Image (cartoon, rainbow, N blue to C red):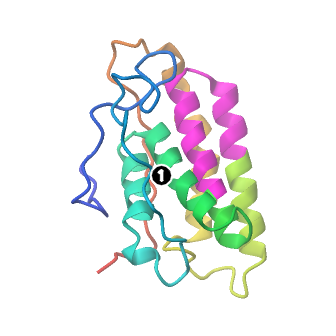
């Protein structure tokens, strides 16, 4: 299934990192991002997100099965926005969804469940704090993200039996923006 890229000029890494199965991206000299300097990140806002290549690239990474890498992309933005407030909590929820993907790759259904459940709880808390809980937030509807968090543990049962030489599993579901960027 083809998915439109949100940051098409940013290349994907050489591989999707899976702990204990592939070289650590930044610590191992064989890692896909070894020696790469940390990017200077602009804090994400409700106004600048459509131009935030780092944010959009995180979505692309997640949707194409680069879960650890999407986690890293969003974690940098989480730090850049001070790790507090609705935007930081929203990024934290996205990070939890990515963590569920990493747990899926590791064949850890309990880890998938915990991370996805925490993501759903964070999305619900942020939604409840909004003046209009049905309005899009950073491009997403809360409903779609809560639904995604609820669905992920049920989409990953086949991951537990995945072997390292098998093609890496990805979730059937994708994160989709409430409306196209253009």
| Image spot of residue 76 (x, y percent) | 54, 55
State which quadrant residue 60 falls in. bottom left
Give the vertical position of 102 relative to 162 (above or below): below
Q: Which residue is mark 1?
A: 73
92 w.r.t. 26: above or below = below
Residue for point 36% across, 37% down: 33
Residue 34 quadrant: top left
The answer to if 17 sits in the magenta stretch is no
Q: Tell me residue 151's x, y (percent).
A: 58, 45
Q: Is residue 27 above or below residue 142?
A: above
Position of residue 1 in the picture relative to residue 90 (left or right) = left
Q: Secondary structure at mark 1?
A: helix
Most common SS among magenta residues: helix
Question: Label 1 crowding class (10 Å Cα cut-off): few <14, some 14-19, many 20+?
Answer: many
x%, y% of residue 63? Answer: 39, 49
Q: Residue at x 36, y 23 (%)?
A: 29
- State left or right for residue 147 relative to residue 159: right
x, y (%) of residue 128? 78, 74
Q: What segment carries the magenta color?
A: 92-117
Position of residue 94 in the picture relative to residue 132 (left or right): left
Q: Residue at x 37, y 76 (%)?
A: 51
């Amino acid at each position: 299934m083809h998915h439109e890229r949100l940051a098409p000029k940013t290349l994907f890494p050489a591989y999707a990192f899976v702990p204990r199965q592939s070289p650590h991206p930044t610590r191992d000299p064989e890692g896909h991002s070894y020696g790469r300097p940390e990017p200077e990140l602009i804090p994400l806002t409700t106004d600048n997100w459509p131009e935030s290549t780092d944010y959009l690239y995180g979505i692309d990474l997640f949707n194409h099965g680069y879960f650890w890498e999407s986690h890293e992309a969003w974690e940098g933005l989480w730090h850049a926005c001070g790790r507090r407030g609705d935007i930081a909590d929203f990024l934290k929820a996205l990070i939890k969804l990515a963590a569920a993907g990493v747990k899926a790759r590791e064949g850890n259904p309990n880890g998938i469940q915990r991370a996805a459940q925490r993501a759903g709880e964070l999305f619900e808390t942020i939604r409840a704090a909004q003046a209009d809980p049905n309005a899009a937030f950073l491009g997403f509807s809360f409903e779609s993200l809560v639904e995604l968090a609820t669905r992920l543990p049920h989409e990953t049962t086949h991951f537990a039996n995945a072997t390292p030489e098998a093609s890496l599993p990805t979730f059937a579901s994708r994160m989709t923006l409430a409306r196209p960027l253009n």
